[in-house]
Amino acid sequence: MGEFKRTVVRELPERKGEISPESQFWNSYEFPVTIKEFDSISHLDFSPIEPHQVAVTTSNKIRLFNPINNQVDRTFSRFKDRAYCGSFRHDGRLMVAGGEEPVVKLLDVSGRAILRFFSGHKRPVHLSKFTVDGLKVFSGDDDSCVRCFDISSGDKVNIFEEHKDYIRCGDANKASRDIILTGSYDHTARLFDLRTSTSIMSVNHGKPVESALFMPSGNIFLTAGGNYVKVWDALAGGKLLTTFGNSHKTITSLWFQESRGRLLTGSLDMHVKVYDAATYGLLASMDYPAPVLSVAVSPVSDLLVVGMSTGLLSIKHKKKDGTPQTEAEKQKKQREKRLALRYFNKGNMYIPQEGDTLVPLKQREDLARYDRLLKRFKHSKALDDAFKISVRRKTPYVTFSVIQELSRRNTLKASLSGRDEKWLCAMLAFLKKHISNPNYVSVVIEVTDIILEIYESVVSSSEPVKKSLTNLRAVIDKELNYHQSLEEIQGMLDVLLIASNADLDSNPDLKIPETTDIFKNQTAGTSNSMEVTEKR
Amino acid sequence: MAASFDSMNATQLVTGGASLVNKRPIFTNDSKKSESTVLQQKVCPESYCHSDVVTNVSCNPHNKLQATTCSLDGTVRQWDIIDGALLTTFTFPWPIYSMLVHETFPTDQFYLCKQKFVGTFEKFSQNTVLMLAFFFNLDSGIFTFVCRNRDRRSANLFYTDANISRGDKGRSEVIFSQLTGECEKLTVVSGNGEFIAGIDDNFLLLYFLKGKKRPTRFKAGSHPLTCLASHPTKSTVAVGNEAGHIIIITNLHRNIISNLEHWHANRVEDLCFSPEGVFLYSVGHECVLVDWNLEKGVKSFLPRLGAPINHVSCAASNALKAVCLLDNAILILSQNVIQQTIQGISRSKLYYPTSYIPCGLLLDPRTNALVKNGRKGHLHFYNIEDDTSLVSIDITGENYVSGNTLDNIRMYTDVVQAAFSMKGDWLATVEEQRAADIRDVQCRVKFWIFDKQKQSFLLNTTVERPHDADVNALEFQPWQKNREGNNPVAVTASLDGKFKVWRYGDNFNNYKKSKCWNCDCVGFYKDAVPSDVSFSSDGSLLSVSFNVTITLWEPDANVLTKTLCHTLSNLPIRKLEFGRGQSSHMLICATSDRITSWNMLSCHVQWSVQLACKLLISDPYSELMASVDSSNKLFVFQAGHSKPLFFMDCRNSIISATFVPRTKSSLGLKEDNLLPWQKHSQLYLMTEEEEIVAIVTKEEAELYNKKQRFQNNLEESLPSTPFAEFLQSHGNRGSGIRKATTDILKKYVGDDTLVKEMVMTPPHILPPVRTLATTFLHSLLLPSDSK
């Protein structure tokens, strides 16, 4: 009466599943506090001074959230229409904001009053920021015009009319008080010197620029637009250093985390990605429920705030490690621990006396449900259990391992028959999803064959099943085309490689690099899928 | 001619692999041991035991210390159970197929024989096969047997042969004619001694011993019956049939009532009643012991016993049950817990029509144990010197599931290749899952590391689909200390035309620190299929045979250095083996018509011999090589010389062979008695019957048999002290210590017949100890002439 051996689950090693220290850092934020606003959150900014409030620009309000209790400390709602780009000054005492009305407003963070109205714009102002010395404010509007105002006097200092489309973003150089960067929908980003009247540099991003950022050193700046980010060297006359981006959709915001040298991008594909600012390599990725419009990390990295197009604001706090507890709490915990220990050790300390009959406690083996069913030869139910949504979505290899075990037991056909339309459609969708995976293809083909064999006569009477089969067929055709093109490429590569090897070495049957073998493996899948199509 | 002299002197000795499960085990009346020990004696046919297969064992119901065996050699022998001494032998002219004893007939025993009558009596045609039952009276030595013709109408008298011991005239009656199937399970004496029951196809036959009731024959179900058991007290018989039904037939004297139970999916292999008759145990190919409570009508199960079961028996005290597994193991169960396992060399025959040992005989370099395929998906380690089973490693981790029908081809995952690294710290296995209707072969390579703390092999790496087709060769690189890159290396070759080099190294995973096997490189040669791989003894050269060509590679760089090809044969190369030791520069390659030896220093053919080679093995520790050709001729040669050192015709078909190095413990034999080439290692062959055959000299064989016999006797006659009993109660450990005491005794007692006699004589008939003391002490002294 040997133990029942568990079904061998053939879990395949997955590279991407491994947790790097960086993604561990970004995963160590707490479950997010989400706040629903009425309108999309277009801009986020952190106050540079303690307690690092975050300014959230949404609809006709700018809200200051307290990072400790996540409550709204203050709301600036003196906007007739939408507000844009609420930004802090470096001392955290003043804020500037543009808006749908063509006025730039200077706000006092601690008071209610609007200190200054900078007028002169003719169209909505999407960009409004302080220069690095905090004495001037620059703004850009939909009239493709950049203006610079002096705070103390409220007078206009400069006006640049070089952009040819809406200005949506910009940043001040952190090293020089006179240099500003603006990005526009005319695909260019320009550097302006406030001491002159024209731009000193213009770079072409290639897509409408959604976000622009100066690095703290002031010699490198980044522009984001489309699904990539470009890095430019300002000192080398606007030389393109690199282009990177792992997003599927437009990148809408950039944020530089100074404390750790990381670059964060928020994108319409609902992801926030973290890059290394030195190598521009992807380090971590986080997903959100809606397209991300703005992203910000507090200066001490304890808060990650993301604003989304649906008006969702997600605030994540860094997990506190080793929080000191009060004495009373500690005692309570210890007491509980002791009680639990006493409960679990009950009877463990008992020393049997001479003549006692010892009955060893038989530990019940903890088997998965499908294993328990297989143990009792309930094959159909075991397949049902392994085909649960939770199992087949997260761990398809478990489903395939159980199918393989059923096939080994010669009961696969019996377990697949007698199913209803809904189940069949689900199974066919599952097969469709995995038929292109070379690890599963043999099992998928076996199951498909059996399903076709069993249900061949009744398929025509069910519209959804027919549709699922057509879909499956389309995937197979696509896969075949793919393999054909791969084989063509392999043929070309082989010719090139052999030609280059022939120069080095006169003996051609020697080692051919392993790269060709990868293609060979994939072609094995082709022949199998061919069989299915022929059968059908 | 030295060679011919050798083969004259040499003989084949079966040293292991006897079947333990051919016959139903029987418990002695004190339940202390089952009778399997007696069964084992058939492995040494020429010794003191039966000269042919032992067909049945039974205990004498009136003398609890005696057992009776019958055999196809026509003899019936009585034994003393405790010391294994032969008491009586009766000789009969015919092979005896079975025997029935019962306590209600103290002097009579029933024997079953199949006899072809040769024209002595006109009423029997020449080839009529008949079953005879005869009464044999032990007291008078007169046996009467009654014979009845096949049509069961006429009774015939005939005389016994004169050469039967104390034979006399008698009568015979054929009670049942034409019984088919396994004789042991065909007939049974009822518990109360009233009748003999037999089965014939789907009929139950009854022959009443008491009263004047006529023999009865009636139909039990519509399927052929396979086994029967009789209730110990009532007139009740249970029969099992091919369809898995169990029919319980009661009230046999008057109106017969039968009751059909059905649980088994395949045929019922054996049935057994508990001593009180409350429970009926049934077994079959499902690996389940079913326990039917006939009074309450409920059944309970003991599942997953490991392999199909063919026999079950129950001790008289009801405390122990014995179950025979078809893979050559007997399980002793108590309260549904396995108390002890008696495991012989496990058999693969039960899963296949013929013997199929795909990974052959291997040698575990660490323990010098033989390794072969055992149960499905297992590797079985076997100590050949003691004929004991060491361990069975589960390679595949799959549950054994029996089929719906017996001939159902089921997909099993089989271990098809296995190899040990040179020091035995690594084990690589290739497993394949195949069936007739599946297009995709599931193939897997596993690497196991030996854990010194746990003293077992632990799985290190599993490679799914290492090749696109079957793997046909697997070998480790001999590892040497002074070489660079100390990571072990293994090579697999496959029918997909590639061979892959696997290297133990860091896991590619960046964040976890672990080591595993990775594919180092892939090699191929034109479009040919590699057939075998071999490493030179220093591991610096890898040879791979492709069709008719041998390719030589540098394993570390994976660079082709040389291709060798000759025109002597156009047949593809099947085996490739580097020489070892002094002839490590030689490479032997075998095709199906010749063996060729290449000299690696000059890259020339050194010699070539026409030989239809079936097997080619090399001794890892010497320069010896052995080859078996298609007509089962064994040749032993050195790689450097074409002239064989030894050759021999093997009696049976050989399927595998291996050299096992001699350990110090086995060097008790004098060197003169060994074959000259076997001084360092012993050659073992495996026959198609999965018996292990050793090639030994005649002296050695005699010595072996003697030793076996002496060991048996001495071991059995040791007085059981309280300490020994305590040890015995601790299961397997006891046997080891008991063996140790035997060894000590042997050491001191030596060959002195006087002492042996003294030890072996029962104490109650010994003269007083004080009279023996002086002689005993004298015998222990070393003779004065020896130093």
Image (cartoon, helix red, strand yellow):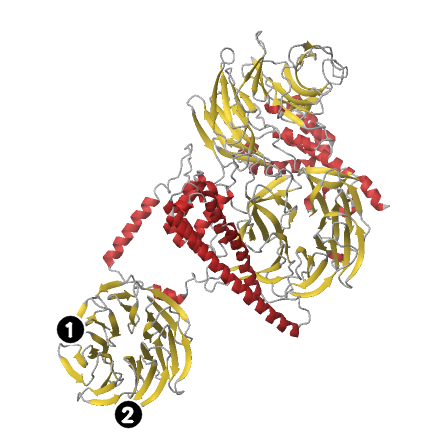
x%, y% of residue B267? 54, 29
Q: How dense is the environment of label 2, judged by Cα within 10 Å: few (below 14), some, or many (20 and up)?
A: few
The residue under label 1 is A77
Does the residue at mark 1 contact the one at mark 2 (Cβ under 8 Å)?
no
Q: Is residue B716 visible?
A: no
Specify which label sits upstream in the sequence, 1 or 2: 1
x%, y% of residue B297? 42, 23
Identify which amino acid the numbered label 2 is placed on. Ser
Residue B392 versus residue B500 in the image, above or below: above
Identify which amino acid the numbered label 1 is placed on. Ser
Looking at the image, the residue that sits furthest to the front is A460
Q: Is residue B534 visible?
A: yes
Q: Where's the N terminus of chain B, which quadrant?
A: top right
Q: Please count the marks in the image.
A: 2
x%, y% of residue B583? 76, 57
The residue under label 2 is A197
- Rounded to the nearest angstrom, the CA distance separating label 1 from label 2 is 35 Å
Between B677 and A519, the one lying in front of the other is A519
Q: From the image, state whether disc 1 or disc 2 is nearer to you.
A: 2
Looking at the image, the residue that sits furthest to the bottom is A196
x%, y% of residue A253? 31, 73
Q: How dense is the environment of label 1, judged by Cα within 10 Å: few (below 14), some, or many (20 and up)?
A: some
